[in-house]
Image: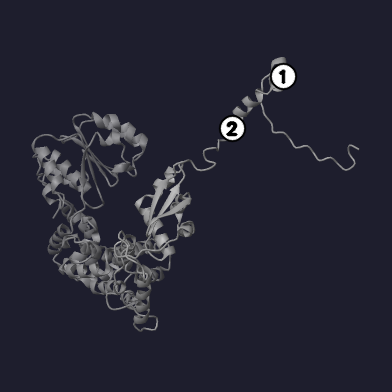
Amino acid sequence: MSSDSSAADSAGEYLVIARRYRPQSFSDLVGQEQVSQALHNAISSNRVGHAYLFTGARGVGKTSTARILAKALNCSTGPTSTPCNQCDICESVTAGEDVDVLEIDGASNRGIDEIRQLRSNVNVRPSRARFKIYIIDEVHMLTTAAFNALLKTLEEPPEHVKFLFCTTDPEKIPITVLSRCQRFDLPPVETESIIERLQQIVHAENVSADPDALQLLARRAAGSMRDSQSLLEQLLSFCGDHITSADVHALLGTVRGGRLQAIGNAMLARDAAAALAELDGALNEGGDAGQLGAQLLGYFRDTLTAAIGCEPAMLLHCSPEDHPQLVELGRAAGASTLLAAAQILDQALTRMRQSTHTRTLLEVAVVQVCQLESLDDLAQLVAQFREGTPPAPARSNSPAGPPRSTGGEPASEPAANQKKTVEQTVNPPARPPAKDVGTSKPIEIKAEDASKIWTQAVSLLEDMTKDFASYGKGVAISGPNCLVVEFGASYNLPKESCERADRRAKIEAALASVCGGPVKVQFQLSATPTPNTAERKPPPNRRQMMRDKEKHPLVSEAIEIFDAEMIRLDKSRPRPAASEGEGE
């Protein structure tokens, strides 16, 4: 039990778990072994710097590390890497009451006036300890003027002063300050380390807890030791002497793992009715729509990592025991489908934060995921289409069975008709085989139809590909299934742009759509400049037009007689038409 707890017990006060079990030595820091070892070695070798910066997410131990370092430097038995935590100095630092260890909140003391007062006090020697130590929490909240006022003192402080900075956003700290500090980045605490620490606390509190319950707490904390301890504090007040996973779900508004897997499996099976039924059951059990959406996003994330070959340790939201099932489910759905599902859920969660219709938005997202096609099959078909090879028969739309029509009957006849249409499109009958298109059939294109085919293909294109392709004018046939498109000599950029692999694929796909089969295309520049292009001259500018007019004999004579200078050139106005009877 820490000194905080002892002081609270003597005063009859209750301390929360996060303070009662706060680390009091470097060995107590959970998940920060590299930082503990570095500071331990610095103290042992007498290489302690004058300024340290501890960065990291919330609840990973930044301020606790700063306090432990302050005790290690000022302990009556030190400086030592193992403070005794029994002397008066150690106890006062732990309680935050030591006169020589000043903890400053950077958010509420961020102005230049506070820093000026700090600069005026640094020259005063410590009252009873070796060092006067300033711990500034959330130091990134200081103003630019305050940072500038601190620079000189920070670079060359008195020998009895140490600065310990803590922040969750080091990017907002000026580089001039960062360069004067020794920086330590504290990573998020691993889930297993959090579980181990929670087990120690539960045992010390004379409470029992199911392993699944502690695992849920650790995962929900997302690397923050303080968050996990705060959740444990709530559970102790909520459920008493024994903590179960059901208690955790009830407190957090989440759904149990079996229900979550049922919803996810129904979504990947494209069974919207079953997915919505499971979702309704989860919400009726006390689940929160926002929490359920976040859980589904995490479930698809873990399924994706399992499908692409990651180890069970990479799972963040599911149990490692579920890894084999996630691998099978993820590979059946395909990585592209899982990515699309995750994007749909992420967008839904963003909208749910700004709407009161959270359940409806979540249900819409679930139905959208259920209607996703097999995107991996689509990518494979596109690749085969580009290569000019006939596509393989598409696999079923749903892992649970063949696709069904709206009436519930198997869609066997439409699938057969679709297969027949595809075969007729890719393999036209009665065509001699081509040598350069693999298994595809040659397309008989007449020379007089080449330009018309190219014009129709260009009309099917979009974006910049259509713009560049429209510069191609001369179209000829160089062989079976092959067109040659000629660009003007000055249109090298459109030609090179059309030769890009992605744009060439789009153009050949449009040609195949027009001709009914694969067609190759070649691009070349014409030998002579395009008509009108070589003769076209840029319009003369205003200065050039004035110089040309000055060469006129009458204008040049007037300039010489009157010693004048042409400063403006106006266009001639058309004469008004003569009125009726005028000039007679």
The image position of residue 319, as x and y in percent, is 19, 67
| Viewer-proximal residue among 474 and 181 | 474
Check disc 2 and give the amino acid type.
Pro
Tell me the element at label 2: loop
Rounded to the nearest angstrom, the CA distance separating label 2 from label 1 is 24 Å
Q: Is residue 62 visible?
A: yes
Give the class, few, some or many, for how many residues have Cα within 10 Å of label 1's Cα (few <14, many ≥20).
few
**Count of numbered tags:** 2
Q: Is the image coloured rainbow, by chain, by secondary structure, or in one colour?
A: one colour
Question: Which quarter of the image is occupied by the C terminus?
Answer: top right
Q: Residue at left 8%, top 40%?
A: 77
Q: Residue at x 35, y 72 (%)?
A: 423
Q: Residue at x 72, y 15 (%)?
A: 561
**Residue 485: x and y, percent?**
43, 51
Could you tell me which quadrant the N terminus lies in? bottom left
Write down the residue under mark 2. Answer: 540
Amino acid identity at mark 1: Ala
The residue indicated by pointer 1 is 558
Element under label 1? helix
The answer to which of marks 2 and 1 sits earlier in the sequence is 2
Q: Is residue 11 visible?
A: no
The quarter of the picture where residue 122 lies is top left
Horizontal and vertical percent for residue 142?
34, 40
Q: Are marks 2 and 1 in contact (CB under 8 Å)?
A: no
